[in-house]
Image (cartoon, rainbow, N blue to C red):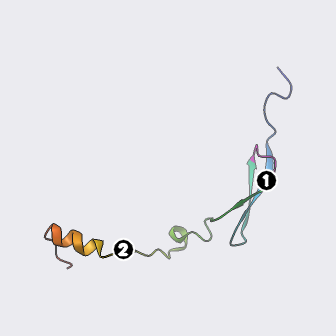
Amino acid sequence: MKKDLHPKYQTIKATCSCGNVMEFNSTLASDINVDICSNCHPFYTGQQKIVDTGGRVQRFEKKFGRSAN
């Protein structure tokens, strides 16, 4: 078997912008920074908001004859 054929597999740290630090095993050589993680993502925190941009829901309902009820 050839030596040094496969990249080194090591533990790295991923730091989120919210301050959460997670450890992963990876072939990356250095730690990484991420913008969002499971601690601050709206889907996981339950703080999702439905955004109606420009009345699109009302236009859809008007076009297809649906009522808001």
Q: Which residue is at the front of the view, 42 or 54?
A: 54
Going by the image, does 22 lie left or right of 3? left
- SS assignment at label 2: loop
**Image coords of residue 49 (percent x, y):** 44, 76
Vertical order, 67 against 36 (above or below): below
Tell me where the magenta segment starts and ends, as one range.
26-30
Tell me which residue sits at (47%, 74%) in the image. 48
Question: What predominant SS class does the magenta segment belong to?
Answer: loop
Residue position marked by numbered label 2 in the rendering = 53
Residue position marked by numbered label 1 in the rendering = 12
Give the residue type that dot 2 points to.
Thr
Residue 57 in which image quadrant: bottom left
- SS assignment at label 1: strand
Vertical order, 4 against 25 (above or below): above
Residue 48 within the segment the image draws in magenta: no
Q: Residues within 10 Å of mark 1 (few under 14, many from 20)?
A: some
**Image coords of residue 2 (percent x, y):** 83, 21
**Residue lying furthest bottom in this view?**
69
Vertical order, 9 against 17 (above or below): above
Q: Residues within 10 Å of mark 2 (few under 14, many from 20)?
A: few
| Label drawn at residue 41 | none
Tell me which residue sits at (73%, 72%) in the image. 19
